[in-house]
Each structure stands twice: as C-alpha cells, then as structure tokens.
Image (tube, rainbow, N blue to C red):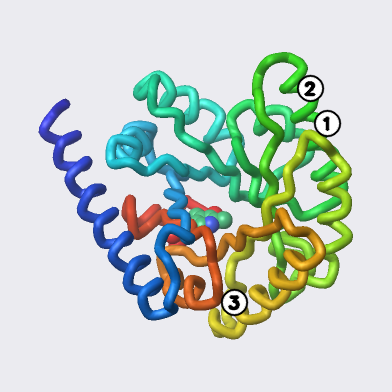
C-alpha cells in the first residue's frame, strides 16, 4: 500500500467509527438493539479501493445506485478482495432493460417500484440461476414514495400491498421489506412516521417484509427512532461527492 492508500484507509476507519457511534447512540435512545440496524455503505462515485477498505474494516453490505457504474466496480472489488464476499445492494432507480445486468452482481434490489420492474427482475433472476450466474433468489425491497410524487420514483404507500403481491408471485424473488428516501422539503420525522405506519401494515399482511430501509448520512438518527432496520450511508463514510453526483 502507498502512503496515500494508508491515509485513505485510516480516514474511512475513523468515519466508520463515528457512524457506528451515531447508530449505537440512536439505538440507545430508542431502546433498540444495534444488531437490528444494518449499515449499508453507499460507494457510488467512489473507487473500488474504497469499497475494498470498507471490506477490510468488516463492512459487508455495500450499495450502488447505477448499474453502469456498479457492474465494473463490483468486478474490480472482487479482484481486489477475492475472499471477501460482499453483499451488493442496488438502491437507485432501475430501467427494466438493466434487470439482466443487475442480477449478476446484486444480492438485493431495494428500488423495486413497479409491477413491470418486478416482472423483469423475476425473469432475469430465473435466467441467471439457470445459467449458473447466481445461486440465490433476488432479495427485493419495494421502494415507497412517502409523498406520492411520481417524478421522484417509488410506489405510493397505498400501492405497496398490490406490488408486494406481484413480487411474491415469483419464486426467484424474495420480498424483504420496503425502502424510502425522505422527501425533500418536508420534515423527515413526519415522513418517517408515515413510512413506519405503512411498513407495519405491509408486514402484517406479508410476514417476510421485515426490513425498513431508511435513513442516510443526514437523518439516520430520526430513521432509527422510527424503526429503520437498514441505514444507507455514503457521505458520512466516504466524504462529499461533489456536484456531478446524483
Ligand atoms: C446516495 C444515496 C444514499 C446515501 O446518501 P448520503 O447522504 O451520501 O449518505 C442513500 N440512499 C440512496 C438511494 C442513495 O442514492
């Protein structure tokens, strides 16, 4: 390793300690066990070497938001850390024509927001399993739109049961829960409260839907208070992404 690599790895280690401390403190305030909150490191726009550094620090759950970037990066990380077996998550909006590519690397897709995407992923997962490109069914979270604004992606809260029905019809998809981003310009706690309510209702009808993925660098404490089981953290672990990034 060069000095620069060592410095970067130390910086990521310090950031990780800080994020874990924030998660632990939020869990303590909420009376929750920190083991019930997964930390997903969002590596979008950052190099494979940063993902490798996270794996060295024991972070196994990594996330990307664009297939075009993630496809090559996941291969690079596999080459850098052959034994590490990361679990990659797709958290960004996904075109149906990218389903085939995504199921090659993703253990889980958190951004399923339409019947047609669910169908495309089910078909793609079945084909990938038949071709020996993957062994397990694809874990799926339904992306919920808390404010129902269709422009920003996500399924309106009252459409979630119907979409869940579509997902469980495919034996190559495994319904795991829901994911959401707090809408811009609204108070995150009010948004998370509505989301938690919808998650509770979905879970009552679909017992496998135990995951609630919400909370990012800026609002993970509020999300944990409202029951998040999975926080997705980019900036607080790896730094700012600048203007070019989504
Ligand atoms: C980029 C991204 C994140 C991480 O956001 P930060 O504010 O950098 O922590 C979380 N979820 C999704 C869907 C993202 O695209």
Identify residue for label 2: 127
Tell which of 28 and 111 is nearer to you: 28
Measuring from the top left, give residue 215's x and y in whole percent.
50, 66
Alpha carbon separation for disc pair 2 and 3: 36 Å
Mark 3 surroundings within 10 Å by alpha-carbon count, few (fewer than 14), some (14 through 19), many (20 or more): many
Q: Is residue 1 above or below residue 208?
A: above
Residue behind mark 3 = 192
Mark 1 vs mark 2, CA separation in Å: 6 Å
The picture places residue 92, in percent across and down from the top left corner, at 61, 49
Say which residue appears at 33% left-offset and 41% top-offset. 58
Give the camera-side residue of 54 and 171. Answer: 171
Q: For marks 1 and 3, give the CA distance.
A: 32 Å
Name the foreground residue: 85 vs 150. 85
Q: Specify few, some or many for label 1: CA neighbours under 10 Å numbering under 14, 14-19, or 20 or more.
A: some
Provide residue 96's location: percent of width, then percent of height: 78, 39
The quadrant of the image that shows the N terminus is top left
For residue 27, which quarter of the picture?
Answer: bottom left
| 96 relative to 233 in the view: left or right | right
To which quarter of the image does residue 26 belong? Answer: bottom left
Residue on which disc 1 sits: 123
């Amino acid at each position: 390793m060069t000095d620069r690599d060592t410095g970067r790895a130390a910086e990521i280690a310090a950031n990780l300690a800080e994020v874990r401390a924030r998660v632990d403190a939020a869990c303590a305030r909420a009376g929750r066990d920190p083991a019930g909150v997964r930390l997903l490191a969002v590596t979008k726009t950052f190099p494979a070497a940063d993902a490798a550094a996270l794996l060295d620090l024991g972070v196994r759950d990594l996330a990307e938001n664009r297939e075009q970037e993630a496809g090559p990066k996941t291969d690079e990380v596999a080459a850098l850390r052959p034994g590490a077996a990361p679990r990659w998550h797709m958290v960004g909006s996904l075109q149906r024509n990218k389903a085939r590519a995504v199921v090659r690397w993703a253990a889980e897709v958190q951004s399923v927001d339409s019947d047609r995407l669910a169908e495309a992923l089910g078909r793609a997962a079945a084909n990938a399993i038949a071709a020996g490109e993957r062994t397990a069914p694809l874990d799926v979270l339904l992306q919920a739109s808390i404010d129902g604004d269709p422009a920003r992606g996500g399924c309106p809260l009252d459409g979630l049961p119907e979409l869940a029905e579509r997902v469980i019809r495919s034996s190559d998809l495994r319904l795991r829960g829901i994911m959401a981003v707090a809408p811009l310009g609204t108070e995150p706690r009010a948004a998370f409260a509505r989301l938690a309510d919808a998650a509770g209702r979905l879970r009552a009808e679909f017992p496998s839907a135990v995951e609630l993925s919400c909370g990012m660098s800026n609002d993970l404490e509020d999300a944990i208070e409202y029951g998040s089981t999975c926080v997705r953290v980019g900036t607080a672990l790896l730094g700012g992404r600048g203007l070019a990034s989504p």
